[in-house]
């Protein structure tokens, strides 16, 4: 009988060990093609595993909404969200927090791009778009849908379907560039980082497609951690995770985002995104 307290303590110790040795999983919105995302985030998983001392796994998803759903259902505990998807996820899981953002995400922007046949040229003035065909990216993209739609409505005073001959949703920024370059759509809205990276990689034919307008800046991507990670992975885990993200210094890893560094973020940084989403009817 005297051994029972020891056995009980041992069982508790083993239970705690099994809880804290669980795999830490994360995902990311699919804003580019799948192979590029897997290359990027498998590297992130290796980095985080080393820094956190637990098994870390990247879980790919097929859509922005699937990323939010995985977060809500605790299939992932961390996500690289866009501004809007982060707001959506944190509303669904109270207590979740934006903990880090790319330096550039403090002042992100969208490009409007046009096929050469439109004759549209780059200008500081909002372009004359009436009667063109237009594609957004994903329906839930901040830089490929939310903010472009807001700027269209603010500058032209009409909903996109009232302005354009045809409106589409490509699914991601890379496909938006491909479709406008091919003339499938005359004009499109893209994440400026994806455009600049594709341009530097020689994937854009500037005789066929060009930037015609650059938006004002707004807050965008961020790492959001799910509420309760300290209970699942041990006291202080969230602080350790935050430090690991902010201390990500490897140039190759940062270039894959691409970001020059990560800086602190908090939920209030994304209130402007939440307000815009409410204004154009994408959030209650």
Image (cartoon, rainbow, N blue to C red):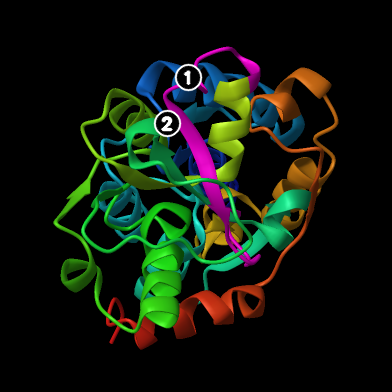
Q: Which residue is mark 2?
A: 32
Using the image, determine if residue 51 lies above or below residue 140: above
Residue 17: x percent and y percent? 56, 39
Q: Residue at x 60, y 46 (%)?
A: 6
* Disc 2, SS: loop
Q: Mark on residue 170?
A: none
Residue 175: x percent and y percent? 33, 30
**Mark 2 packing: few (<14 Cα in 10 Å), some, or many (20+)?**
some
The count of marks equals 2
Which quadrant of the structure image shows residue 10?
Answer: top right
Q: Which residue is mark 1?
A: 36
Depth check, front residue: 106 or 165? 165
Can see residue 50?
no
Residue 124: x percent and y percent? 63, 61
State which quarter of the image contains the C terminus: bottom left
Residue 56: x percent and y percent? 54, 30
Are the residues flagged by discs 1 and 2 in contact, CB closer than 8 Å?
A: yes
Q: Is residue 156 magenta?
A: no
**Boundaries of the magenta span:** 200-223
Residue placed furthest toward the front:
119
* Disc 1, SS: helix
Using the image, determine if residue 39 lies above or below residue 261: above
Horizontal relation, residue 181 to residue 90: left or right: left
Can see residue 5?
yes
Depth check, front residue: 153 or 51? 153
């Amino acid at each position: 009988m005297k051994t029972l307290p020891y056995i009980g303590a041992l069982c508790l110790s083993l239970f705690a060990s099994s809880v804290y040795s669980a795999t830490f999983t994360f995902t990311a919105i699919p804003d580019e093609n799948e192979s590029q995302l897997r290359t990027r985030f498998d590297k992130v998983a290796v980095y985080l595993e080393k820094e956190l001392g637990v098994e870390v796994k990247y879980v790919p998803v097929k859509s922005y909404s699937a990323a939010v759903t995985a977060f809500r259902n605790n299939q992932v505990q961390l996500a690289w969200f866009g501004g809007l998807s982060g707001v959506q996820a944190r509303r669904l899981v109270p207590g979740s927090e934006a903990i880090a953002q790319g330096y550039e995400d403090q002042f992100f922007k969208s490009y409007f791009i046009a096929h050469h046949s439109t004759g549209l040229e780059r200008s500081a003035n909002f372009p004359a778009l009436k009667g063109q065909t237009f594609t957004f990216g994903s329906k839930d993209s901040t830089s490929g849908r939310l903010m472009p739609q807001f700027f269209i409505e603010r500058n032209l005073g009409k909903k996109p379907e009232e302005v354009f001959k045809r409106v589409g949703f490509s699914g991601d920024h890379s496909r938006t560039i491909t479709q406008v370059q091919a003339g499938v759509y005359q004009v499109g809205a893209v994440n400026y980082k994806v455009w600049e990276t594709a341009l530097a990689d020689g994937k854009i034919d500037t005789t066929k497609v060009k930037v015609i307008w650059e938006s004002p800046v707004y807050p965008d991507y961020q790492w959001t951690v799910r509420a309760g990670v300290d209970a699942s992975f041990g006291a202080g885990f969230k602080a350790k995770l935050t430090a690991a993200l902010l201390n990500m210094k490897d140039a190759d890893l940062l270039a894959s985002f691409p970001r020059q560094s990560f800086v602190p973020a908090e939920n209030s940084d994304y209130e402007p995104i939440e307000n815009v989403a409410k204004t154009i009817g994408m959030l209650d």
